[in-house]
Image (tube, rainbow, N blue to C red):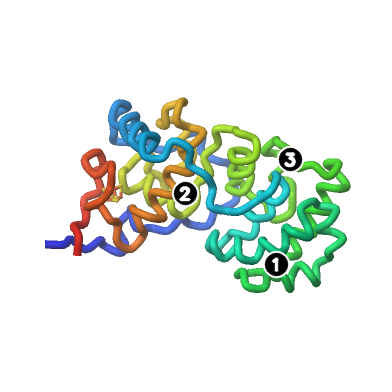
């Protein structure tokens, strides 16, 4: 018999909006021991040795723009819009030359496009005026850019600059609570927990493995536990069987 996932079970929660205030020093401890967590990542690594972001980009600037545009939108939807956009504006200078009106027109298929267009122009201006046209590598500098929060900064630091940061989006938040790798009530709490429990050797790619796992296997409404490569290591109580 197929078990139905309870809609409001902890593992089904969407990542809540981050509230202002100091980040907790550490996430809550996982119930899984270190050997089991290492085995989870060993399997992810074996199945996908070189995981990549599904956002298309050409350089750190276009990555930053793509991530900023991807909030509450699908990577596929962002890629459709940025194909033409990045052909004409792959640097902050060119983005400023394009201007907000034309940018807005080019990204109007993406949710919240008006606000995102404003932010992309504002961050392009700040990159030119403050950072010599380069995307900074440091978190503080990245987070000083308009529309760039902790999650976007983490993705850019990881993907563009090879830092072992773990950006917690709605998929990672859900998966981390379900398994539970790093239980937490907020994305920052989960991020701190993951930083603590993910073995160093796997930290660089942990973000992508967990996102892809959440997007394609450990789905929000009905996780596909019957084909999950870590099902025997996961403690989620409402595992599913094929329909
Ligand atoms: S068994 Fe796999 S798909 Fe199912 S809840 Fe656990 S991690 Fe998610």
Do the residues bearing badges 2 and 3 touch, measured as CB atoms within 8 Å?
Answer: no
Mark 2 vs mark 1: in front = 1
Residue 85 x/y as whole percent: 72, 62
Do the residues bearing badges 2 and 1 touch, measured as CB atoms within 8 Å?
Answer: no
First in sequence, mark 2 or 3: give its number: 3
Element under disc 1:
helix
On the rendered image, what quadrant is the N terminus found in? bottom left
Residue 141 numbered tag: 3
- Seen in the picture, residue 109 relative to 202 is either above or below; the reply is below
Residue 54 x/y as whole percent: 53, 52
Residue 231 x/y as whole percent: 24, 44
Mark 2 beta carbon near ligand 1 (under 8 Å) = no
Element under disc 3:
helix
State the residue position of label 2.
186
Q: Is residue 129 left or right of residue 198?
A: right
First in sequence, mark 2 or 1: give its number: 1
On the rendered image, what quadrant is the C terminus found in? bottom left
Q: Residues within 10 Å of mark 2 (few under 14, many from 20)?
A: some
First in sequence, mark 3 or 1: give its number: 1
- Seen in the picture, residue 201 relative to 91 is either above or below; the reply is above
Q: Find residue 40 and report its image quarter.
A: top left
Q: Residues within 10 Å of mark 3 (few under 14, many from 20)?
A: some
State the residue position of label 1.
115
Q: Find residue 235 and report its image quarter.
A: top left
Residue 78 x/y as whole percent: 60, 62
Q: Residues within 10 Å of mark 1 (few under 14, many from 20)?
A: few
Q: Is residue 173 left or right of residue 242?
A: right
Element under disc 2:
loop
Residue at 67% of width from left, 61% of height from top? 82
- State how many labels appear: 3
């Amino acid at each position: 018999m197929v078990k139905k996932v309870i809609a409001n079970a902890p593992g089904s929660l969407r990542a809540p909006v981050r509230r202002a205030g100091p980040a907790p020093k550490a996430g809550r401890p996982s119930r899984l021991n270190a050997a089991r967590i290492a085995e989870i990542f060993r399997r992810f690594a074996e199945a996908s040795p070189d995981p990549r972001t599904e956002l298309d980009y050409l350089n750190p600037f276009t990555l930053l723009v793509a991530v900023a545009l991807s909030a509450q939108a699908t990577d596929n939807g962002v890629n459709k819009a940025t194909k033409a956009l990045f052909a004409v504006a792959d640097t902050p200078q060119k983005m400023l030359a394009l201007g907000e009106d034309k940018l807005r027109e080019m990204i109007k298929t993406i949710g919240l496009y008006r606000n995102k267009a404003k932010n992309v122009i504002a961050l392009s201006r700040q990159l030119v005026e403050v950072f010599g046209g380069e995307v900074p590598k440091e978190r503080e500098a990245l987070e000083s850019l308009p529309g760039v929060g902790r999650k976007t900064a983490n993705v850019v630091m990881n993907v563009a600059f090879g830092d072992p940061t773990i950006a917690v989006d709605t998929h990672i938040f859900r998966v981390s609570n379900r398994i539970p790798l790093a239980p937490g009530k907020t994305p920052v709490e989960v991020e701190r927990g993951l930083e603590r429990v993910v073995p160093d050797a796997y930290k660089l790619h942990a973000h992508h493995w967990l996102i892809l796992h959440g997007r394609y296997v450990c789905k929000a409404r009905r996780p596909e536990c019957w084909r999950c490569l870590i099902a025997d290591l996961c403690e989620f109580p409402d595992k599913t069987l094929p329909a």
